[in-house]
Image (cartoon, coloured by chain):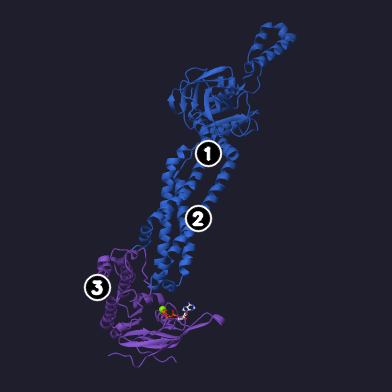
Chain colours: A purple, B blue
Amino acid sequence: MNQAADAELAIETKSLTKIYGSGNTEVVAMRDACMKVARGEVVALLGPSGSGKSTFLTAVGLINPPTSGQVFIRGQLILDADQAQVNLRSFRRQHIGFVFQKSNLIPFLSAIENVQIAIELNGQSSRVARQSAQKLLDDLGVGDRADNRPSMLSGGQQQRVAVARALANNPSIILADEPTAALDSHRGRQVMELFAQVAHEHGAGVIVVTHDHRALDVFDTTYEMEDGRMFQPTHSQPN
Amino acid sequence: MNLATKDIRHNLGRFALTTVGVGMLLMIVMGMGGIYRGIIADATLLIDSVGADLWVVQRDTRGPFAELSRVPQNLVHRVYAVPGVTASREFVYHTVQRQRDEKALRMAVLGLSWPTDKGEWIQLTAGRSLKQNHFEMIADKSLGLAVGEQIKLGKETYTVVGTTSNMISSGADGIGFVTVADAQAIQFDVPGEAVRLERASRYARGESSEVGIKQPALLENASKPSFELPTTPRAQISAVMVTVSPGADVNEVARAIAGWGDVSVYTSSEEREFLLKGNVEKVRRQIGLFRVLLTVIAAIIMALILYTLTLDKIHSIALLKLIGAPNTVILGLIVQQALVLGVVGFGIAFLIGQKIFPMFPRRVILTNPDLIQLGVIVLGISVASSLLGIWKAMHVSPNEALS
Ligand SMILES: Nc1ncnc2c1ncn2[C@@H]1O[C@H](COP(=O)(O)OP(=O)(O)OP(=O)(O)O)[C@@H](O)[C@H]1O
Ligand SMILES: [Mg+2]
């Protein structure tokens, strides 16, 4: 079961299983989920509510370890069941960008500071970090709101700031859980295209959980989950 | 980027209010220490400023600041004759409580050895020191007597000629300085009828005694106050204060006087110790305990405040963990806020205290060593009280950023 991992892959998961609770309240949220994401590949993850998409994403994101199975990132074994093989926190800091369902910004920091802090945590000086943060916000069309706190921003603007933060450190993998839920379809598509661009330019692997079937053409691959099982639909693959 | 200050700025109003609250609490802790210092300073002020090297007191007593001490008035002259003594003065000191303007006036009356001591050593806030050996008084300002005011004590009326400040007894009563003769007159004042009865009985006894019959002129003395009678009078003063000449050895002089059977001798610092050990010790312990309790309470309250501040930020902390912030960043956020709370609170305590403490009925003295000590304690409890918050922060899972 522990075959040598492919270093060309950005992400590889081997039979990830997550069981919440025990006994009567036991919930198998994810069962033997396997996925391979190449460097530069953008993957859409579809599935009905409660099918285990978030569970899978947080397992790959190293914040919610699986009950069994392995997570490889860039060919390196990172999680063996719930056993961490590296310092997860510093690994997340250097290699993973997150965007989640709900906006997840720090309320006491302004938009630009929310991006800046992620860059500073990776050892950049605050001046350099601020410049890169401003550029990212400009790219995402929220540069003019840089000094506003999250509470002063609309849901869509908050989500774009979160995207900027996810991209800030040129991560090896980007994990997004319905990042476009709060955006109109135009903006939503823009964000997806931005993910694709980062993936292609920097060789990052991207997994996006989405319900928005209109933007599926942006993705290279589509996976689906149902009842905790992962599969790849053979028909709906656009070119 | 400093997360601690960013968060404080975001919640500035609430944080400021909390800090003021902590500051008030620390002000009380500070005030307790100051009250303690004040009590010691007030209690020892008289001993310290009266400037005696040695105290000669009734044998086997600990002197006038600890208990009742009675020595004969002529002891002043006996002591003066000891080699090495440059000055010896009577110490006459007692407390009276009289009615004045419908209010009780408590006053500690201290006798000055006219004419060697006119009260020049007393720091005056107004008026002058004594110029005659009767019916003049220097009053502490806490007595509420101004220069020129008159007060009747016993059969005589005394005029306030000078005022001073912070001259109070260990019981916090203001001191009135008069001459020794006046102080004794006040102390031994007896109603006229009692004097007449006493004189009559002395006269009767004198007439029937052999001396009285042979020397009728002696009977003149029967009408004098008892402390002026030419026999060996009853011990009428509390102690004798001795000043030793600069060249002489204090211990040598003390040893010489200690050889006499009727007195004990103590140095000023011994007499000071008796006062502190006796009168002030319990007050000191009481205030000390209160201070410890208040410090503990301050620490608990600060811990709860910091815990709540951390709980308010727990989502942000989980998020910081999610994006990979190391523990030092999170620790820094909490501890720095704790230190800001403690340091600014301490500053507020000091500033408000300086304004408020002078209005207290007794002195509150803030000394630098006390302030430094409290400052160090505040830093200590700031860090210690953030432990609860740190513990909470360390246990939050990055997953909680998603809920
Ligand atoms: N902490 C938890 N404890 C117990 N059960 C959980 C927990 N988190 C998720 N589950 C359960 O696991 C299953 C999968 O949940 P998950 O959040 O992964 O679904 P999802 O596909 O992301 O749904 P949605 O599209 O609504 O976000 C659900 O049945 C859910 O109730
Ligand atoms: Mg979900």
Between A150 and A74, the one lying in front of the other is A150
Rendered-image quadrant of the C terminus of chain A: bottom left
- Tell me: residue A138, above or below residue B183: below
Q: Are marks 1 and 2 in contact (CB under 8 Å)?
A: no
Q: Quarter-wise, where is residue A227 in the image?
A: bottom left
Say whether mark 1 is within 8 Å of ligand 1: no
How crowded pointer 3 is (Cα within 10 Å; few <14, some 14-19, many 20+) is rated as few
Give the side of residue A116 with respect to residue B380, left or right.
left
Q: Residue flagged by tag 3: what amino acid is it?
A: Asp
Residue A31, numbered label: none
Q: Residue drawn at (40%, 52%), measured in percent from left and top?
A: B344
How crowded pointer 2 is (Cα within 10 Å; few <14, some 14-19, many 20+) is rated as some
Q: Which quadrant of the frame does ligand 1 lie within?
A: bottom left
**Position in image of residue B365 (x %, y %):** 47, 40
The lab-note entry on whether marks 3 and 2 share a chain reads no
Which of pointers 1 and 2 lies earlier in the amino acid sequence? 1
Identify the residue under disc 1.
B39
Rendered-image quadrant of the N terminus of chain A: bottom left
Q: Is residue B116 visible?
A: no
State how far apart marks 3 and 2 are (Cα).
Answer: 47 Å
Q: Chain of mark 1?
A: B
- Tell me: residue A123, above or below residue A1: above
Say whether mark 3 is within 8 Å of ligand 2: no
**Position in image of residue B199 (x %, y %):** 68, 12
Identify the residue under disc 3.
A139
Q: Residue drawn at (43%, 58%), measured in percent from left and top?
A: B338
Between B118 and B146, the one lying in front of the other is B146
Which SS class for mark 1?
helix
The lab-note entry on whether marks 3 and 1 share a chain reads no
Identify the residue under disc 2.
B301
Q: Residue flagged by tag 1: what amino acid is it?
A: Ile
